[in-house]
Image (tube, rainbow, N blue to C red):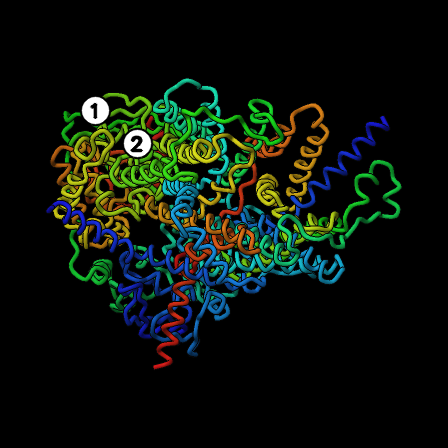
Amino acid sequence: MNFVEMRDISKYYGNVAANSHVNFSVQKGEIHSLLGENGAGKTTLMKILYGMTQPDSGTISVGGKKVRIRNPKDAINLGIGMVHQHFMLAAPLTVAENIVLGYEPKKGMFFDFEGAVKEIEALSEQYGLKIDPRAKIQDIPVGQKQRVEIIKALYRKSDLIILDEPTAVLTALEVQELFGVLKGLKEAGKTIIIITHKLKEIMQVSDRVTILRSGEFVCTKNTADTNPNELAELMVGRKVHAMEESFGGDVDESAPVFLEVKDAVYKEHKVKKLNGLSLKVRSGEILGICGVEGNGQTQLIETVTGIIKLRHGKVLVRGEEVKDPTPLRMLNLGVAHIPEDRASRGLIKDFPIRENTILGYHRRRQFSRRGVLNIREMNRYAQEMVENFGIKVGSIYDPVSSLSGGNQQKVVIGRALSQNPDIIIAAQPTRGVDIGAIEYIHEKLIEMKKQGKAILLISAEIDELMALSDNIAVIFGGQIVAQGKASEFDERRLGMLMTGYGKEEKEHGSH
Amino acid sequence: MTEFLAGLGTLLSGAIRIAIPICFGALACTICERGGIVNIGVEGMMLAGSFGGVLGSYLTGSAWVGLLFAILAGVLFAAIHAVLTIKYKTGHIISGLGINLLASGLTTVLLVSLWDNRGKSDAVASLGTINIPVLKDIPVLGDILSGHSPLFYILIVIGVVMWIVLYKTVFGLRVRVVGENPQTADSVGINVTAIQYICVLACGAIAGLGGAYLSIGDIGLFSRDMVAGRGYIAMAVTIFGGWNPIGAFGGSLLFGVAQSIQFRLQEVAPVQIIQMLPYILTILVLILVKNRPKGPAAAGKSFDREAG
Amino acid sequence: MEAIKKCGVYLRQKIKQLFTSKSFIVSAISLLLALIVSGIILAFSGYNPFTAYVNMFGGAFGDMSRVADTLGIATPLILCGTAVAIAMRGGAINIGAEGQLYVGAMAAALTGIFCQGLPAILHIPLCILAAAVAGGLWAGLAGYLKIKLKVNEVVLTIMLNYIAIYLTDYIVTYGVKAEGMVVKTPNVAESAILPALYPHSRLTIGFILAVIIVFVVRWMMKKTVFGLELQAIGNNLAAAETGGVNIGKQFLVTMFISGALAGLAGAVEVMGVHKYFIKGFSPGYGYDGLSIAVLGQNSPVGVLVSAILYGALRSGAQVMDRMTKIPSDFVGLMQALIIIFVATPGIIMAMRNFARRGKKNHD
């Protein structure tokens, strides 16, 4: 029997269809994956099911009955729970408070904190989810936060739990643990929906999979009847090659080292985010940094772009130490920066495209003299970049926020690559853009490498790293724990290394 | 020794008198910002309360009815702030400034319209003071705690109740979550908007009482712009008090002590320097007190479900 | 001839653009709504709103001397409004314009009194410079505390307003008080007085200075690296940082310039209107600056237009105050309504939708 049935669902944001006549159904007691690229409409569909947004048309039935889900409360009452990609937790409050929120136990007039703790302890025992109900959310690691979210759904007696990209922030070990939990929940009769774009996870954990592509329903398949290649093609809509080819190769060891980080140490809130990290990138090399999010990647990026100042260690550009690095100094030394989050660091969304194409380089003589901007040159330059990088714009005077995600990213990339940098810090260069743009961006990076630039590539996509990098360095706990030619690694080994298993090996080796 | 104690008693008693309206303002700000709405309009809400108090007392001859009017006036202005910031998502600071200007303009226009006087209203019945039977006979302590306006005792009740509500009840838990992360609250089916309206309206009522203390608490008349910046000081006290009702008491008392020492110093130092002291003190406190608790993370941002 | 024609066409285009732009329409409708609502409030308070408005309009524009007064009052408002608008564009909420204005006024007065014997051509710029520096430093202090010690700038600038007002009061009372009961300084030297543009009015060359500053600021915002960086910070601090902008320095400079303009507002009052510093001379120009910046939507030209409008309200209110029983504070009420409506386009949208629906039902 179908537990949930969504029929002919459409949702428009302005003129863009996030969902267009989507059909989706889940059977009771199954683990069902919802697969699609970024922007395929997976999250929107699930937000509709959870009542966080309203569809423009279509119907939803739960347990065979037609329902209207106007808000999350309706969804919860229907037995639907959701674990959001960005956890919905209040940091200064305790685990128990967060879990019972909205359905708090009472003792007379008052909130029964002890009662809540007891109930949570019971739940955590029943499902084997260990947690300290009295800890504050701000003090527990990411994996536990997710556990809190799952217990939260169980506490609300959810029969159906939706998880949005649950593995994005987890280490390989935590992922296995999560899958164990999910299978246990399935055995206990719960229904699970996982939103994901990771094919291997689908094959490993789910019973069925539904594929969405640019807002439209493609098909639903039994996992047993399909394979990763077929899923990838269905997801993208054509044969995919890019990721399987490898563009990496041997690096000329005599080429000059353009960028070097030596013994970098950086502390944040008393935690060593960089702990003696060292690396070198040569001219004509793409060095890929591989690691689980939160192991010092952000701090590494911010170090080599001058945003943060190291406690110990140094940054060398073309062999010379950079004294007192600042973003401006690094830019002027020819270190271009493609920030990992274009919305928060990359672009100024209310500024015109034109201003965004020169931001960071606006002090150069090409664009300004004695503090006065050369508007004519800015116009020409922006127009040229729009043409060179195939950015689809109405006019260069429109705010950059009017562009699609892929075109916004092209502005960021175009800006970084157009001022003839020696060194390119490319952080998540293809995050949140469509396949077409991904291929284009990859081509551009390879072209830059061939021109002799040194590229530091930081990416959460192992496929991307394997495809582009000549060498790969694995980052764990603020250190490089392994480094070598890209061809020497496979995914299994990388997976071990990035979760800290290789570290002991290395230490043994050095003894 | 006894002389010193008596002096201390008078000083503290004076400090409390100064602290009362500021503490009302700070409690008002506290509940409002806990719900995620920044309120620089507390100044205007207090002013509305001052005027409402006198108006009620003038119309009925009863200061207690005046108190009711004060609450209503504060709530009315709070309602405007609430609708603007919650429904229409106006910038909180701008809306607050609007409230302040509105209250200042409206009360003056009404002042002239009702009493044909630009400076102050006619004298009306005031609440007077209460002497607490046993307490008043205890030396020093009696001087400090007895003989205040009934609003002092109301203030203490409000503060304690607010603390219990915020930290010991389900509603308070929800308020804290709304101010911290409204998306979280929304995602578990809590009505964010309703909670925010309740917080802002409660803020208006409390601010109205604080305003009433200034007008009918003692002297029994309204004078133009009589809140004179206490609302702004209350905002600072709120920050200093860590958005906690108990902290609000501490902060406003500290301010009251500084101010009442100032009155004594007036014989030795120029009055203007002395008048500056509380404001300098406020800045210094904000600078020096390290590890201040952080405020509600989402205060000042209007909640929009679709955007989250 | 050809050039003049071209100029005319260009101007017409610009004016058309201005009047059809969305922000202008929102401001204009807000203004209208504010007039209606405050009229209703007046009626309920027992006054005749039409007499009030007629008196106000006459007071603001009745004859040349009234127009001159309107522009004269607008002068400090233009400067304060621009001061607040610059800060807002740069991501700072400067509620401290009032205090910066007092400090600037005092600096201008002291320079005007004590630097005797200079020719006006030197003395006037010197006083203006002193006022700008004083106001700038006062605001810079707030900026510094905000950046280095993360003190909330809203509370900070409000506190600094009180401190500035008492501090200048202290300086007058104990330092440079003129004979008599009034707490004011002696007159500034003849050479420090701003020439009047219309006899016996508040209108001085200060107005021209203010208008020039508006256009300089506009140019700066649109055409300079400084303006680009300032607005980059205001819009997205992290992206500005990534783009090589020195956040701390730029923020301080923004606050300094904002304060300098507010200080100038103080100078034109002292050197043009009063000829001396007098305790409590500002009826809240600094706070008006905030609502003017909101009404002008932080654009320099918008601020210019709004400030003249506010000047008209204030000078009209003085006449209304004399001719009717309505106190001039009524203007505060109108201003409040104006900024509430401008800052809340949602209200106007809701009304438009309501009107449309009504129309549809009618059909």
Report helix, strand or loop for mark 1: loop
At x 23%, y 35%, the residue is A362
| Residue extending furthest toward the top | C117
The picture places residue C295, in percent across and down from the top left corner, at 40, 51
The picture places residue C77, in percent across and down from the top left corner, at 42, 42
Disc number for residue A327: 2
Mark 1 vs mark 2, foreground winner is 2
Tell me if residue B179 comes above or below residue C113 in the rendering. Answer: below
* Residue in the foreground of this view, choosing between A503 and A70: A70
* Residue in the foreground of this view, choosing between B247 and A120: B247
The chain ID associated with circle 1 is A
* Residue in the foreground of this view, choosing between A235 and B14: B14
Tell me if residue B264 comes above or below residue B228 in the rendering. Answer: above
The picture places residue C355, in percent across and down from the top left corner, at 38, 72
Tell me if residue C144 comes above or below residue B54 in the rendering. Answer: above
Residue type indicated by callout 1: Arg
Q: Earlier in the sequence, mark 1 or mark 2?
A: 1
- Total numbered labels: 2
Mark 2 is surrounded, within 10 Å at the Cα level, by few (under 14), some (14 to 19) or many (20 or more) other residues, namely many
Residue A332 at least partly seen? yes
Residue A96 at least partly seen? no
| A125 to the left or right of A4 | right
Residue under circle 1? A318
The picture places residue B190, in percent across and down from the top left corner, at 52, 62
Residue type indicated by callout 2: Pro
At x 80%, y 35%, the residue is B9
**Hey, which quadrant is residue A11 in on the image?**
bottom left
Q: CA distance from mark 1 to mark 2?
A: 17 Å
| B208 to the left or right of C326 | right
Mark 1 is surrounded, within 10 Å at the Cα level, by few (under 14), some (14 to 19) or many (20 or more) other residues, namely some
